[in-house]
Image (cartoon, helix red, strand yellow):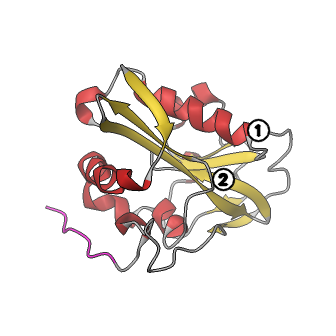
Amino acid sequence: MITIRQERPSDQSPREVLLDRAYGAIRFRKPSQKIRAGRLPAEGLSFVATHRGRIIGTVRLWNVSAGGKAALLLGPLAVHPDYRSRGIGAGLMSHAIESAQRLGHGAIILIGDEPYYCRFGFSAAATGDLRVPGPFEQRRLLGLELVTNALEGARGMIAGNGSRIPATDPRHTPSASPARKRPRAA
């Protein structure tokens, strides 16, 4: 049985292993990582999928300013290769979206493939005037308004504005730290 639950501090190490397996070293060079670096995820919006106590999926949401508008940045979403095509990623997405809406957030932004994310309501319609740090494909910058017109008039750079991670914080994760020694790509 697959369970989706709130991420716990003890999930940090297996979560990192899962992300390394799913994305490799390139995950540290993604534009969305530049936004997340040095920040804590949004309160109550970090989830893992487990099977028999093993972490097999993960998703987090982060507080951002989207051209002056409050929003959340979703990512990374990852599912262990042995568990893909079983609806786990979709389950994590739905759980994250419903949780963000329940907590009163107005919009979620992500960088991803519209054919996958459109089934959750994401599109590039409200993100055309937004940018992220570094090179990216504008068509892959997608938004979902949880509140009507939450991204109306949003233009400019998307920047992290959530709580910063203190170096001594037990939630300090390697992926959130720009100081982490990054593995070399093969």
Amino acid identity at mark 2:
Leu
> The C terminus is located in which quarter?
bottom left
Q: Is residue 23 left or right of residue 4?
A: left
Assess disc 1: are there few (<14), some (14-19) or many (≥20) residues with their C-alpha within 10 Å of its C-alpha: many
Q: Can residue 23 be seen here?
A: yes
Q: Is residue 174 magenta?
A: no
Range of residues picked out in magenta: 180-186
Give percent across and percent down for residue 178.
40, 76
What is the number of the mark on residue 72? 2
Splitting the image into 4 quarters, where does residue 55 fall?
top left
Residue drawn at (64%, 67%), measured in percent from left and top? 162
- The residue type indicated by label 1 comes to Leu
Q: Quadrant of residue 51?
A: top left
Residue 128, position as x, y percentages in the image? 70, 52
Which residue does the image show at 49% across and 27% down from the upper left? Answer: 90
Prevailing secondary structure of the magenta residues: loop
Q: CA distance from mark 1 to mark 2?
A: 11 Å
Q: Secondary structure at mark 2?
A: strand
Q: Name the residue: 47% across, 73% down.
A: 169
Tell me residue 48's x, y (percent): 43, 40
Give how far across and how far down residue 95 sits, in percent: 58, 32
Q: Which mark is residue 146?
A: 1
Camera-side residue: 52 or 70?
Answer: 52
The N terminus: image quadrant: top left
* Occupied quadrant, residue 49: top left
Q: Is residue 78 visible?
A: no
User: Badge 2: few (under 14), some or many (20 or more) residues near its Cα, within 10 Å?
Assistant: many
User: With respect to residue 72, does 146 lie above or below?
Assistant: above
